[in-house]
Each structure stands twice: as structure tokens, then as C-alpha cells.
Amino acid sequence: MRMKRRLPDEVLEFFRNQGKKGGKLSGKARLAKMTAEQRKAVAKKAAAASAKVRSAKAARKKQT
């Protein structure tokens, strides 16, 4: 069985920064390719998920 080795901190930081760059670029590219209807559908889905989380949080708070 091999033991896992931890990467050096500077390598981890490099990978984190690369991931941040890609995430910001890919979101904009995705939206640019969508139609207005598709963007609206995505926004509605996100709003519904957010509302579900908020209402669950409020329900937990009300119980205590």
C-alpha cells in the first residue's frame, strides 16, 4: 500500500490559482453561448434552490 504524499504549499497554491482562473472564464463563456430563455431557466433554478435553503434554515431556527 502506498502512502499519500502531500504536495508542497507552493505547488498547491499554483493549482488553486489555476482553478480560480478557469472557473471565472468558463462561467462567462457558458453564459455567452446561452440564449435569453436558457439564462432565464438557469436563474429560476438557482433562485428556487436558494429559496429552499433559506426556508430550511428558517425552519431550523424556528424549532430552537
Image: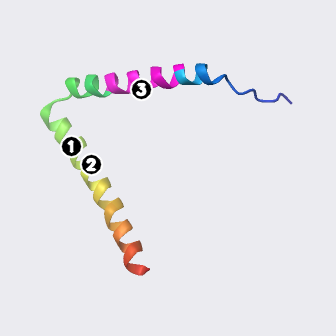
Task: Quickly name the residue at label 2.
Answer: 45
**Disc 1 packing (10 Å; few <14; some 14–19; many ≥20):** few
Q: Indicate the position of residue 33 as horizontal and vertical percent values.
A: 22, 23
User: In which image quadrant can residue 36 be found?
Assistant: top left
Q: Mark 3 points at which residue?
A: 20
61 to 7, vertically: above or below: below
Please report contact status of discs 2 and 3: CB closer than 8 Å, yes or no: no
Does the segment drawn in magenta span residue 24?
yes
Label 2 to label 3, Cα distance in Å? 24 Å
CB contact under 8 Å: marks 1 and 2 = yes
Query: What's the residue type where badge 1 is placed?
Result: Ala
* Residue 20 falls left or right of residue 38: right
Q: Distance between the residues labelled 1 and 2?
A: 6 Å
Of the two numbered discs 1 and 3 in the rendering, the one whose residue sits closer to the viewer = 3
Q: In which quarter of the image is the C terminus?
A: bottom left
Q: Earlier in the sequence, mark 1 or mark 3?
A: 3
Which of the two residues, 59 or 46, is positioned nearer the viewer here?
59
Q: Distance between the residues labelled 1 and 3?
A: 25 Å
Q: Residue at x 19, y 36 (%)?
A: 38
Magenta residues, start to end:
14-26
